[in-house]
Amino acid sequence: MVASEGRPVCGHAQGHRTPPPARPAASAAWHAKAGDSSGEEFGFSQPFEVDLGRAALIAEALRESGYPLCTADVVTAELARPEHERGVIGRFAADQLERAGWRP
């Protein structure tokens, strides 16, 4: 399903703007890559790519939190947009990756 401005809709009321609550315990797959000691800050507000495994974990959390049609493809599409163009799903996904210390 696609909203009128071309954004995917994940089966939740369109007027809903509050992101679902964060999962308290992140799995090992959410953590930064081993040996990554670049020290460079990554800007999560810019468009970026994430692997399907991490996108699937985020989509699962969103489905459990009231977005029943959310998929890994929707998550990756949202993250490929600049922050000002992201919907709730993209903002939630970027926030979860940042909190987990993930880096590309």
Image (spheres, rainbow, N blue to C red):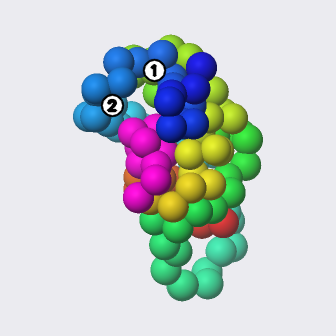
Q: Nearer the viewer, residue 81 or 29?
A: 81
- Residue wearing tag 1: 67
Q: Secondary structure at mark 1?
A: loop
Amino acid type for the residue under numbered disc 1: Tyr
Q: Residue furthest right?
A: 52
Question: Is label 1 in contact with label 2 (beta carbons under 8 Å)?
Answer: yes
Residue under the point 49% across and 72% down: 43
The span from disc 1 to disc 2 (Cα, nearest Å) is: 9 Å
Q: Secondary structure at mark 2?
A: loop
Q: Which amino acid lies under the numbered mark 2 shown in the image of this protein?
A: Pro
Query: Percent from the top left, x then y, of residue 56?
Result: 65, 33
Q: Is residue 26 left or right of residue 6?
A: left
User: Which comes before the other along the chain, label 1 or label 2?
Assistant: 2
Residue 72 x %, y %: 66, 33
Residue toward you, 74 or 33: 74
Q: Is residue 37 above or below residue 17?
A: below
Q: Is residue 73 above or below residue 11?
A: below
Magenta residues span 84-92
- Quadrant for the N terminus, please: top right
**Circle 2 residue:** 20
Residue positioned 28% across, 26% down in the render: 15
Q: How far across and down, in percent of the image, does residue 90 sit?
A: 48, 45
Q: Position of residue 61 (x, y in %)?
A: 48, 28
The secondary structure that dominates the magenta segment is: helix
Horizontal side of residue 27 vs 34, given as left or right = left
Q: In the picture, which quadrant includes the C terminus?
A: bottom right
